[in-house]
Image: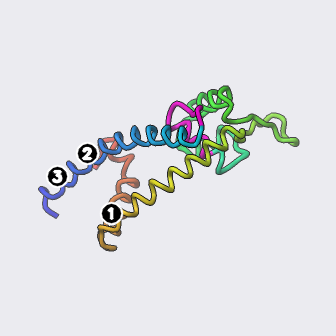
Amino acid sequence: MSEGLKRTLYERFLHFVHLTEQMFTAEISEFTGLAQSHGITSIPNNLTSVHVIDCIGNNEPINNTSIAEKMNLSKASISKISNKLLQEGFIKRNQMVDNKKEVYLTLSPKGKRIYELHATMHELMEDRFISVLNELSESEIQASLKFFQVMIEKRDDMFKGET
């Protein structure tokens, strides 16, 4: 592959990263609108909190340590987010009968509504994504998959400045 083609791919990658930031902003806006259309007036104030609710809903009962591991975030961040979600009534704290020391989190009815709404939104987003992929051949999709896999595998090297 020529150096020019690699540089063009890098430029497109940077453009894609910037678009991804915009997509996250649009996602929270769309989520807010979807919530309002379903009569939900109280939602978490950021997408990470919504994803914590999603993680709890997919794995309940679950503790902060397991959430942090599954989401690849620090325990401190998850503790802060879960305390806020608890305070806002989206989750509940529970202790197991056989282990009073360990605290587990589950969704409250209010949290379950957010969890279900988030799942609905992701279905819509997946459908849109797949419709865009219909413009590509199978070999183009396979090449894209390989590109993302290599980027995921090499991400630590890229941030350390290694090649």
**What's the distance in space between the residues labelled 2 and 1, CA to CA?**
16 Å
Q: Are marks 2 and 1 in contact (CB under 8 Å)?
A: no
Q: Amino acid at mark 1?
A: Ser
Magenta extent: 40-55
Label 3: which residue?
A: 7
Q: Nearer the viewer, residue 87 or 121?
A: 121
Q: Amino acid at mark 3?
A: Arg
Q: Residues within 10 Å of mark 3 (few under 14, many from 20)?
A: few
> What kind of element bears circle 2?
helix
Of badges 1 and 3, nearer the viewer stands 1
Position above or below: 53 against 44 = below
Q: Is residue 8 left or right of residue 132?
A: left
Label 1: which residue?
A: 144
Label 2: which residue?
A: 14
> Which residue is depicted at the point 32% across and 60% down?
147
Q: Amino acid at mark 2?
A: Leu
Q: Position of residue 130 (x, y in %)?
A: 40, 63
Q: Earlier in the sequence, mark 1 or mark 3?
A: 3
Q: Position of residue 135 (x, y in %)?
A: 30, 67
**What's the distance in space between the residues labelled 2 and 3, CA to CA?**
11 Å
